[in-house]
Image (cartoon, helix red, strand yellow):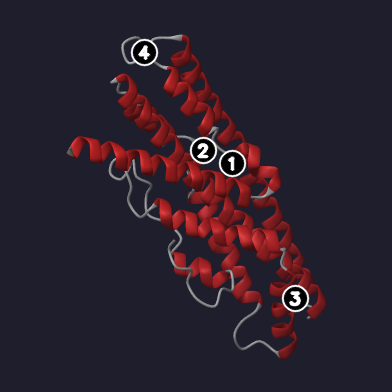
Amino acid sequence: MQAAQERERERERAMKFGKRLKRQIEESLPEWRDKFLCYKDLKKLVKLISATQPSSKAEAEFICLLDSEIDKFNAFFVDQEEEFIIRQMELQERIKRVAATSAAAEYGRIGTEMVNLHGEMVLLVNYSSVNYTGLAKILKKYDKRTGGLLRLPFIEKVLEQPFFTTDLISKLVKDCESTMDSMFPAAAAAAATAARDEAVMMVEQRVFRNAVAALVTMRELRRGSSTYGHFSLPPLTLPDADLLHSLQLPSPIPIL
């Protein structure tokens, strides 16, 4: 009875993650949607693998797709990091040029771009979390189906991949927050305050909305699940409260 209940809970958790991943993809930037884990395709392959004959065409396709997915994650993640570094450096240079003139309108434009950049970087941190969690879950399904032990060595390899290494992107987020704080200090003149408010109002809504959704997802993925333990995600290097504050939310979002 207890085993049957555990299996039922496992199925429910798997369904929840599948729905969460689908929601996350739908709420992501359109140009990012094909960069996420092909969870459904991997799940179909797992179902085709026989427990008595795991070494099959389906298993070979499963392993091949896993490797391909990791290559996809790495390529996308590294490209985005490089783009963010360039954009942040360019914004820093513009800030230096504008500082001498105190042009509120230009400060507002820069502020808008800075807030958008911050939101996209938060999305990239979430991209790493969601895809890692998906890999851990699909590998657990594979091990249960075949009686194999693929998850541990595969996850150990994943932990060394660029897409999982978020130290740099987390630092970029913090640097971006520091820049915004220095641009719009609490004791700034009225013109600077107006520029800050204009930047927040003008920020591209899809980035803002998606970044908030990403924060909720990152919280959910770290609450503890069937993958909690050795395969769990590490704690957020960026506190939720800081992120929510920097996104100008009036209060923390409740965990769904």
Mark 3: few, some, or many residues within 10 Å (few <14, many ≥20)? some
Q: In front here: 194 or 64? A: 64
Which quadrant holds the C terminus? bottom left
* Gap between marks 2 and 3 measured at Cα: 36 Å
Q: Considering depth in this image, is 194 or 212 the residue closer to the camera?
A: 212
Name the element at disc 2. Answer: helix
Residue type beneath disc 4: Pro
User: Mark 1 and mark 2: span between their CA atoms?
Assistant: 7 Å
Q: Earlier in the sequence, mark 2 or mark 3?
A: 3
- Which kind of residue does numbered mark 1 sit on? Phe
**Residue 53 on image: x %, y %:** 35, 9
Quadrant of the frame with the N terminus: top left
Query: Residue at point 66% right, 59% down?
Result: 207
Give the crowd class for mark 2: few <14, some 14-19, many >=20 residues within 10 Å: some
Marks 1 and 2 in Cβ contact (< 8 Å): yes
Q: Earlier in the sequence, mark 3 or mark 1?
A: 1
Q: Secondary structure at mark 3?
A: helix
Residue 115 or 186: which is nearer the viewer?
115
User: What kind of residue is marked 3?
Assistant: Ala
Q: CA distance from mark 3 to mark 4?
A: 64 Å
Seen at 59% across and 74% down, the residue is 248
Residue pointed to by mark 4: 54
Instruction: Provide the residue designation for mark 3.
Output: 99
Task: Judge depth for marks 2 and 3 and give the one in front.
Answer: 2
Disc 4 + disc 2, Cβ < 8 Å: no
Which residue bears the numbered disc 1? 77
In percent of the image, x 54 and y 56: which residue is there?
214
Whether 227 is drawn above or below 157: the answer is below
Q: In the image, what residue type sits under mark 2?
A: Pro
- Viewer-nearest of labels 4 and 1? 4
Residue at numbered disc 2:
162
